[in-house]
Amino acid sequence: MDKSQLRLVLRVALLALWASVVLSISLAFLQDKLLPDVLVEWHKSSGGQFGLGDIFALLFWGLGLFLFFVSSIGVFFYQRWAAWMFTVVTAVFSLQLLTSPTVEPGISSFVGSWSDVLTGIVISLVFFTDVLRDDSRPA
């Protein structure tokens, strides 16, 4: 593939990734309606009062989403710094999955899996192809 085709694939993958993130967030609000009753009850019983830890978690996720969109917009415009930022943000916020069990509907898991695939495509394109190389500078 030539560089213009790779850049098109990168931009399409980023747009699909943004759509999957928005869809995942939307599905999170519908989680109680998409889970079986037993799991809804378990999910409600595992959460307590809204406290200081929840505020930190919301700030953590808000910062993560902000950094994700900043870095992915930078990658959309072929910036090398953004590729590194995108990779680090993805790695750091993937570690959150190790902290607690998760219960989610099948559709959320499906969308999350495709989001992971798209993230892998983006990282592969920016680090293993010349999609970000600036041809105006000498090699």
Image: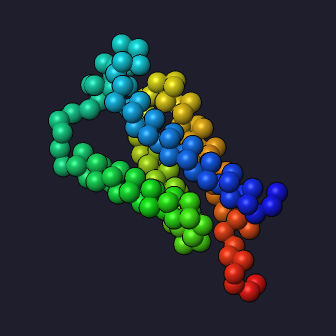
Answer with the quarter of the image where residue 6 lies.
Answer: bottom right
Q: Is residue 22 above or below residue 127?
A: above
Percent x, y of residue 33: 36, 18
Relative horizontal placement of residue 109, taking residue 42 as reference (left or right): right
Please name whichever residue, 29 or 74, is drawn nearer the observer in this view of the structure. 74
Q: Is residue 82 above or below residue 57?
A: below
In this rendering, position of residue 99 left or right of residue 110? left
Tell me where residue 20 appears, x and y as whole percent.
Answer: 51, 39
In the displayed structure, 64 sits above or below 16; it is below
Name the residue rendered at 29%, 29% in the picture. 46
Can see residue 127?
Answer: no
In the rendered image, the residue lying farthest to the top is: 37
From this view, report whether residue 73 is shown above or below residue 132. Answer: above
Q: Residue at x 56, y 30 (%)?
A: 110
Residue 39, horizontal then vertical, whole percent: 38, 19
Q: Residue at x 34, y 21 (%)?
A: 32
Quarter residue 130 falls in: bottom right
Which percent across, then down, holds residue 99? 42, 45
How has the structure been colored for display?
rainbow
Asked whether 73 or 101 is in front, the reply is: 73
Q: What is the quadrant of residue 139 in the picture?
A: bottom right
Q: Residue furthest right?
A: 1
Q: Is residue 14 left or right of residue 47?
A: right
Which quadrant: the N terminus? bottom right
